[in-house]
Image (cartoon, rainbow, N blue to C red):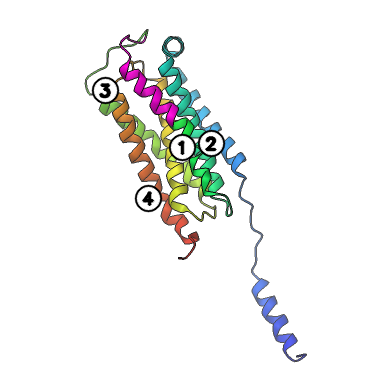
């Protein structure tokens, strides 16, 4: 027994020779605050292009647009927090349901806007190809949003990488919709709702495909 002790000591010394301290990943709350900061940075960047007077009047005069706006904001924040929470081992998969209230408000408000007969005040006439322009903007801004989301998840230990990255994509879609509303002086229409739905599905799919492979190594073996 005593003869083996030096070998064990050498083995432990060899294994620990190149160890480096591990940096702690920011908590889900801190990462969510960083995500909110990114959303606000986008609002500030788009402010020179925003007709704030018309934007506020439309929200105050048409409750459905206000509900949809609040829903998109909540969806982005809650989905981001859920993604960051699920990236921590041991967290319940029920966190995946956290964005549901925001999604219901977002879709419900958008749907009510399509059924409303009165036109929202200070709304402009939609240009030709409006749906394609909205879809292009949503997909374009989702690229930097998705890159930041994957950066915040890159060192995570997600046991459910598919759900985690899908929630991250949903957070990006919500933030992109909020940014679009700032430069979208048009009333809610069925084409808007359709373009948003298509964009959400594409953004969620893109972030999931881009991020799941990086996090898949942490999947629990079946």
Q: Please identify the quadrant where the N terminus is shown.
A: bottom right
Residue at image x 37%, y 8%?
A: 122
Quarter of the image for the C terminus: give it. bottom left
Dot placed on the residue nearer the N-terminal end, 3 or 2: 2
Residue 185, percent from left and from top: 36, 15
Label 4, label 3: how far apart the Cα atoms are: 28 Å
Q: Give the residue at x 44% y 37%.
A: 172
Q: 91 or 55: which is nearer to us?
A: 91
Instruction: Give coordinates of residue 165: x percent, y percent.
Output: 45, 47
Viewer-side label of 1, 2: 1
Nearest to N terminus: mark 4 or mark 2: 2
Q: Image point 52% across, 49% down: which residue? A: 93
Circle 2 packing at 10 Å, graded few (<14), some (14-19), many (20+), is: many
Q: Is 101 situated above or below 16?
A: above
Q: Is residue 169 left or right of residue 123?
A: right
Q: Say if mark 4 contacts mark 2, CB within 8 Å.
A: no
Dot 2: element: helix
Residue that label 1 marks: 171
The residue identified by callout 4 is 209
Local crowd size for mark 1, using a 10 Å CA cut-off: few (<14), some (14–19), many (≥20): many
Q: Which residues lie in the magenta part?
A: 104-120
Residue assigned mark 2: 35
Marks 1 and 2 in Cβ contact (< 8 Å): yes
Above or below: residue 17 compared with residue 112: below
- Residues 196 and 182: in front is 196
For marks 3 and 2, give the CA distance: 29 Å
Q: Residue beneath label 3, please?
A: 130
């Amino acid at each position: 027994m005593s003869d083996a002790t030096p070998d064990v000591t050498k083995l432990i010394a060899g294994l620990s020779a190149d160890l480096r301290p591990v940096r702690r990943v920011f908590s889900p709350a801190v990462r969510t605050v960083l995500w909110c900061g990114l959303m606000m940075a986008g609002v500030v960047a788009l402010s020179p292009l925003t007709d704030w007077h018309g934007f506020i009047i439309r929200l105050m005069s048409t409750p459905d647009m206000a509900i949809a706006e609040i829903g998109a904001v909540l969806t982005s924040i809650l989905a981001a927090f859920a993604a960051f929470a699920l990236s921590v081992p041991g967290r319940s998969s029920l966190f995946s349901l956290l964005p549901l209230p925001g999604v219901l408000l977002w879709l419900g408000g958008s749907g009510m806007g399509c059924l409303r007969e009165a036109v929202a005040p200070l709304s402009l006439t939609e240009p030709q190809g409006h749906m394609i322009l909205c879809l292009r903007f949503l997909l374009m801004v989702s690229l930097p949003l998705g890159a930041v989301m994957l950066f915040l998840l890159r060192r995570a230990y997600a046991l459910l990488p598919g759900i985690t990255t899908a929630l991250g994509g949903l957070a990006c879609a919500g933030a992109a919709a909020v940014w679009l509303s700032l430069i979208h002086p048009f009333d809610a229409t069925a084409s808007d709702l359709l373009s948003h739905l298509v964009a959400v599905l594409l953004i969620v799919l893109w972030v999931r495909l881009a991020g799941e492979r990086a996090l898949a190594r942490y999947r629990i073996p079946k």
